[in-house]
Image (tube, helix red, strand yellow):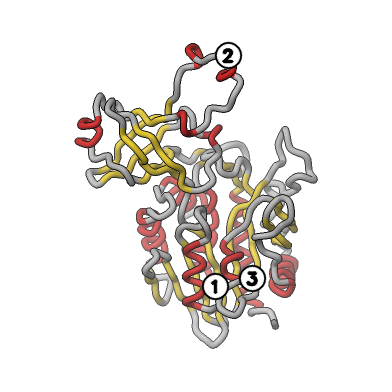
Amino acid sequence: MSMKELLKNLSEACGASGFEYSVQNVIKKELEGHVSSLTSDSMGNLIAVKGEGDLSLMVAAHMDELGLIVKHIDDKGFIRFAKLGGVPDHVLLGKRVRIHTSKGMVEGVIGCKAIHVMKEDERKQLVTYDKMFIDIGAHSLNEAQALGVKVGDPITIYMDMFELGGDLVCGKAFDDRAGCAVLIELLRRIEDPPFKLYGVFTVQEEVGLKGATVSAFALNPTVGVAVDTTIAADHPGAQDHEAPVKLGKGPVILVADGRRDSLSGGLIANAKVREWLVNAAERASIPYQLEVLEGGTTDATAIHLSQRGIPAGVLSIPSRYTHSFSEVVSLNDLENCVKLLVEAVKIGLPSL
């Protein structure tokens, strides 16, 4: 299976935070026969193991995607929702959605009051999510309930992956199904790692790095690496100093990330882990980018604070329009990310 086909299968699977089951099923199928063991923990993290030894590497990629959850159904059958993760309001309006009920999938569309009946001041304002609703075609609360819809049902955005020019593709949930694709390929290609390799597909990253917190504590690896996407702003409206990462220029090795005003709450990547990744890229002649990211973080932040502290780093895939449900990545960047990780494993873990 090609990287494009793998990414498509992962992207189009539905798995909002806390409801990652169908993504798990895709990954299990893809890894069958390629790892020594594949188990799920009580949180829902999927843990693949390959190799053995006293030293260990945990490579984490999160399965969950940004989503919504049913909050209320009114007497006319319209559905109000809450957010699962950092969903920007402006990307929601008009989106097709799928509500995952005990009776099966129910399709709908996110709507709001038409602009024609908005007051003048309303027209100038962003329509916030609390003024939106989901229309499933029901005419009453009873009709909506008969379809299986109830409070607490997860909701995902409907979006098929498609190709753009060159090696670019567009789809939903590349954050972090692109990372999941890279981790699957790493586990497939590495035959006999010189240490114990944990491939951990984590849950609930978008709502607080929860899966990584639990799995890192349980596994207590020697080194941790999160594989995620990062912001590529090589498009109109953004300047290089705001987000200098570019598509097609190779995977991104993190220096530090965190909040915009201070980089607190994030990760200052372990210097030896960072140099280990840089060395792997240069040995294999793989193009790479370095990054200081303001405004976000990854599972590595949870990993490095586990137990007595775990040296950790991040390897990222550049992505345009992150958290928009129409993200754009370069397949070459994904392939180079896999190659970099394969080379890093072959080198062996850094001396800490």
Q: Earlier in the sequence, mark 1 or mark 2?
A: 1
State which quarter of the image contains the N terminus. Answer: bottom left
Residue type at tag 2: Glu
- Residue appearing at x 70%, y 54% in the figure: 293
Q: Could you say where residue 201 lies in the image, as x and y percent from the top left? A: 47, 63
Horizontally, is 342 left or right of 22 in the view? right
In front of the other: label 1 or label 2? 2
User: In the rendering, which numbered label is found on residue 58?
Assistant: 1
Horizontally, is 17 left or right of 183 in the view? left
- Residue appearing at x 56%, y 78% in the figure: 307
Cα–Cα gap, marks 3 and 2: 51 Å
Residue underneath mark 2: 120
Residue type at tag 3: Ala
Circle 1/circle 2 CB separation < 8 Å = no
- Residue appearing at x 52%, y 80% in the figure: 196
Horizontally, is 217 left or right of 138 in the view? right
User: In the rendering, which numbered label is found on residue 312?
Assistant: 3
Residue type at tag 1: Met
**Count of labels shown?**
3
Q: Secondary structure at mark 3?
A: strand
User: Dot 1 surroundings within 10 Å: few (below 14), some, or many (20 or more)?
Assistant: many
Image height of 117 relative to 49, above or below:
above
Q: Earlier in the sequence, mark 1 or mark 3?
A: 1
